[in-house]
Amino acid sequence: MAQIRVEALDKSFGTFHAVKAASFTVEDGQFLCLLGPSGCGKTTTLRMIAGLELPTAGTIRLGGEDVTMNRASARDIAFVFQLFALYPHMNVRRNIGFPLKCEGIDAVERERRVVEVARILRISHLLDSSVSGLAGGDRQRVALGRAIVREPKCFLMDEPLGALDTEMREAMIHELRALHDRLGATTVYVTHDQLEAMAMADMIAVMNDGVVEQVASPRDIYDRPASLFVADFIGSPPMNFLPFRGSLEAGAQTIRLGEHEVAVPAAREALAESDLVLGVRPEHVRFTDRGMVRGEVYGSEYLGTTQIVTVTTRYGALKARSPASVSFRTGESVGLDFRPDTLSIFDKESGRAIRTALYEGGAHG
Amino acid sequence: MSTANAAHSVVEPSAGTRRFAGSLVILYAVITMIPLIWIVLTSFKSPDDAISYPPKVVFSPSFEGFCNLFTTRSRQTPEFIQTLGPPQGLCDSIARSRNMVVAGPSNYVPRFVNSLIIAFGSTVLAVALGTLSAYGFSRFRVPLKDDLLFFILSTRMMPPIAVAIPIYLMYRTIGLSDTRLGMILLYTSVNVSLAVWLLKGFIDEIPREYEEAAMIDGYTRFQAFVKVVLPQATTGIAATAIFCLIFAWNEYAFAVLLTSGNAQTAPPFIPIIIGEGGQDWPAVAAGTTLFLVPIVVFTVLLRKHLLRGITFGAVRK
Ligand SMILES: Nc1ncnc2c1ncn2[C@@H]1O[C@H](COP(=O)(O)OP(=O)(O)OP(=O)(O)O)[C@@H](O)[C@H]1O
Ligand SMILES: [Mg+2]
């Protein structure tokens, strides 16, 4: 088990810059999710940690040791591929035992450890089956078995649940997390599914277009996004954005939105007049007749215990989460206001979050 | 095989359709088999039956063709034959009935052995080289990859006979003319382009994650190649080997030109088997019949792989 430290990692494929100065640290025993949209460089980052791809610049440390230029086999890590990469010409037992065979561990010891791993993953009854006949979930377990059998320093997983159906996925999310709690192995887990990341991770690193935008706990990622991209990418429906123009003084507790004063978390930096964006989560929008933003109900989407109400306002369509028991008529005029301590402010140009009492800054906090 | 495929069909064909399709297949099989059957039949005919007109379908079988294939004979007067002891085996008695005695073995066996050595040798070489280079082309960033691949393929674009004369002169200068090694190298160089292209297709289909997983688990790239890639490429390798073997086994033009006494293969030898009064058709047919055996055996042995292989890896589980 070991800490993984990635410092200013860069990767170019010819002229294409796939990963740009990515930095994050996974503490010993932590479960970090690398989350981001398709093509943002998650797999490339993971492959560099594994040693399957050499970085253009930057360093990778495993347990303090600089392994940037080491061969994959010298890094003592396990990689679970999206395709599982089970060898079709071997049965389950030999697939799981394969890494041990590579290490030259004798047959008796190998058998003991394979049986043990199979027991943990509850696939003992499948040991002698061929892998090609296995169902998705069982293939996934065999792939995990092959990873954990060697007791490596850390696990790297590239969308290991991507090929499973929704139901299987839910079950595997909990199994994976339980397995992690049991083994306590440092894990980097790549996914583009925010629910997966939220459910499993100790820490989430959000990537966009080759850049790590924020590294934080799932709660902080959700409540204190470091950039417009993170705020928009996380949460369903995503955060509402209200553009406005204004300046900020350090310590200011209000902003001017149109003709209204809106209470916000106290600013921690001063800002000259510029284009800004106010970010409000749908669940922090309240319906009140004294509301400072007025609009018309456009429609609502029933979700069981809650509903998402879309209101057209002069700032665009805003989505609000409200209890399903309240009923709204389409076209009804409503007033909205926002819970002050939950609001985020972003610089429109750069997309970064303004430091406030809510968000203390430092994308890598 | 058929049951597995039946599960995929959307509508089960009716009995009538099946019978019709079945008879078409049988008809086609018969048409393609007729020349083969004719050759096998001819090899068991006597020389007179072989050239009789109209052709005889029913005849009394004779081993004269096979005897003539494996022996050389000399004509003797009946009086001389009388003075000899009893005939030495079947072929001797057949020869004596035609006033001849067996003088010795023919060249068929050494020619056949040459064919085996040259065809299998070049197949093994071409497939081995082809697999390695296909793997390289498939997995590594090779400078000018596309140009190189095209260049390799372009060696197949002209008819081989167009380069026969230069090769003949070259081989004579460097002493490879009429040697088995020369023929192995020649057939290898012709086949290797086919092998690279076929095998690259197969290897491209094997996800590289397999080797990467093995490399993370502690194998070197070469070990991963041998232990992980090769087992998964067996289908492609088998199919490629059969194509290479068939080419090398049947090759005629270069063999005629470049080989004679020492390294001659069976194809240029068989048609020139001359008997009494011209071409010895039963012996030629017998030579051809035996010549078919190795390919049939090899193909049957690899049939399982070939069936999946000739779809060029298009079928994925
Ligand atoms: N070997 C390569 N050569 C050239 N470009 C590459 C290579 N590998 C990846 N890329 C490019 O780098 C970018 C990032 O790829 P990467 O596979 O890391 O994305 P990802 O975040 O894992 O996406 P996904 O969710 O689709 O798996 C992509 O635009 C991809 O096309
Ligand atoms: Mg990926």
Image: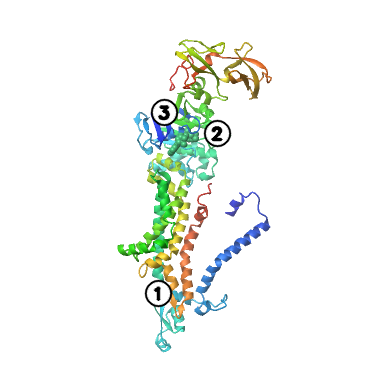
Of marks 3 and 2, which one's residue comes earlier in the chain? 3
Identify which residue is drawn at 43% across, 80% down. Answer: B92
Left or right, residue A316 beside residue A159: right
**What's the distance in space between the residues labelled 3 and 2, CA to CA?**
29 Å
Packing grade of label 2 (10 A; few <14, some 14-19, many >=20) is some
| Amino acid type at image mark 1 | Ser
Packing grade of label 1 (10 A; few <14, some 14-19, many >=20) is some
| Callout 2: SS | helix
For mark 3, what is the residue? A22
Above or below, A142 against A221 in this view is: below
For mark 2, what is the residue? A169
Quarter of the view holding residue A155:
top left
Residues at discs 1 and 2 both on one chain: no
Chain name for mark 1: B
For mark 1, what is the residue? B106
| Amino acid type at image mark 2 | Arg
Say whether residue B301 is visible.
yes
Answer yes or no: disc 3 within 8 Å of ligand 1: no
Say whether residue A158 is visible.
no
